[in-house]
Image (cartoon, helix red, strand yellow):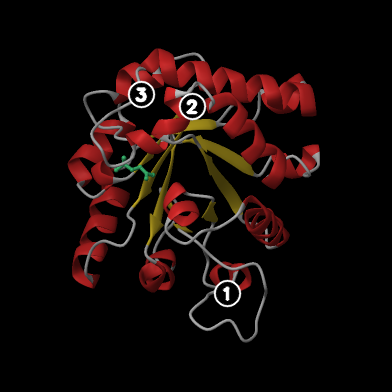
């Protein structure tokens, strides 16, 4: 059975008191119809992860693949794990486009995260140009092949895939439920040919990109959409909780 998951990506937002307040409101009010994750800014990770993570798992938005060393400004998978992170985002489009992270680098990050026993939320998705030239499948397949498909079937069990069309992130433009489900089905088909049906049917595939309380129900009712990775709407507890209740 695939897990239903709603994950918030807080990005580089919130001051300490706001982060504490938001985390408190979410963890007090989350019910158990799905698994909930909060990918919080690195500076708040240790404190929030030290709180009760029964209802809301805390994850990092990024981490480096080396364990220790002369990598000024970075924190490692090993360090976030030691600070009780449960998961890490790898390959978010903002990391790819703003920080120029390549598929090869992301592969190293995936391996380092799994070695620490973290859940990997691997993000993939096409840009507007790629969508307009109908290249989305090709682009996504390459992202999966280059950074993820070297994993064993056993390792894939700790991976969640997030399909996030770049043109829908933070733009208020959501992929239609049909558009999103079509890509999710494509990803599952590729998982099936690589890992077999059992494995493909156990990997959760989330949709991300302007998902909000008014479109979540439609998106989550699709056959291959197992939840959402939520940016802007995860910063308001009311919206984030409403999205969780859309299942
Ligand atoms: P958004 O962001 O919901 O604000 O579009 C999603 C994401 O970047 O993960």
Q: Which residue is mark 2?
A: 226
| Residue 167 vertical placement versus 46 (above, below) | above
What x and y, as percent, mark residue 33? Answer: 41, 30
Q: Point out the image quarter for the N terminus.
A: top right
Tell me which label, 1 or 3, sits earlier in the chain: 1
What x and y, as percent, mark residue 45? Answer: 42, 68
User: Looking at the image, which is closer to me, 64 or 102?
Assistant: 102
Mark in front: 1 vs 3: 3
Residue occupying image coordinates x 60% and y 20%: 186
What x and y, as percent, mark residue 151? Answer: 77, 44
Horizontal side of residue 186 vs 27, given as left or right: right
Q: Which residue is mark 3?
A: 175
How many angstroms separate mark 2 from mark 1 (CA)?
A: 29 Å
- Label 2: state its secondary structure: loop
Q: Which residue is mark 1?
A: 79
Horizontal side of residue 31 vs 89, given as left or right: left
Residue 78 occupies quadrant: bottom right
Classify the position of ligand 1 by quadrant: top left, top right, bottom left or bottom right. top left
Crowdedness near tag 3: few (<14), some (14–19) or many (≥20) residues, C-alpha within 10 Å: many
Residue 208 occupies quadrant: top left
Residue 70 visible: yes
User: Looking at the image, which is closer to me, 12 or 137?
Assistant: 137
| Residue 196 vertical placement versus 97 (above, below) | above
Mark in front: 2 vs 3: 3
């Amino acid at each position: 059975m695939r897990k239903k998951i709603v994950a918030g990506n807080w990005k580089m937002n919130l001051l300490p008191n706001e982060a504490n307040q938001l985390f408190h409101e979410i963890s007090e009010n989350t019910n158990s119809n799905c698994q909930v994750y909060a990918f919080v800014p690195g500076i708040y990770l240790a404190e929030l992860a030290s709180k009760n993570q029964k209802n809301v798992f805390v994850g990092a938005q990024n981490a480096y693949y080396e364990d220790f060393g002369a990598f000024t400004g970075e924190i490692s998978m090993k360090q976030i794990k030691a600070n009780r992170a449960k998961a890490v985002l790898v390959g978010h489009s903002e990391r790819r486009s703003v920080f120029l992270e390549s598929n090869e680098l992301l592969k190293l990050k995936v391996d380092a995260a799994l070695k620490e026993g973290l859940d990997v939320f691997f993000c993939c998705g096409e840009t507007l140009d790629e969508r307009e030239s109908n290249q989305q499948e090709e682009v996504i397949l390459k992202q999966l092949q280059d950074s993820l498909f070297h994993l064993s079937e056993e390792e894939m069990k700790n991976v969640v895939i997030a399909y996030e069309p770049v043109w829908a992130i933070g733009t208020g433009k959501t992929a239609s439920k049909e558009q999103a489900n079509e890509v999710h089905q494509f990803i599952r088909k590729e998982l099936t040919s690589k890992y077999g049906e059992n494995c493909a049917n156990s990997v959760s595939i989330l949709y991300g990109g302007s998902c909000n309380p008014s479109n979540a129900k439609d998106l989550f009712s699709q056959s291959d959409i197992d939840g959402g990775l939520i940016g802007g709407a995860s910063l308001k507890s009311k919206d984030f909780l409403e999205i969780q209740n859309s299942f």
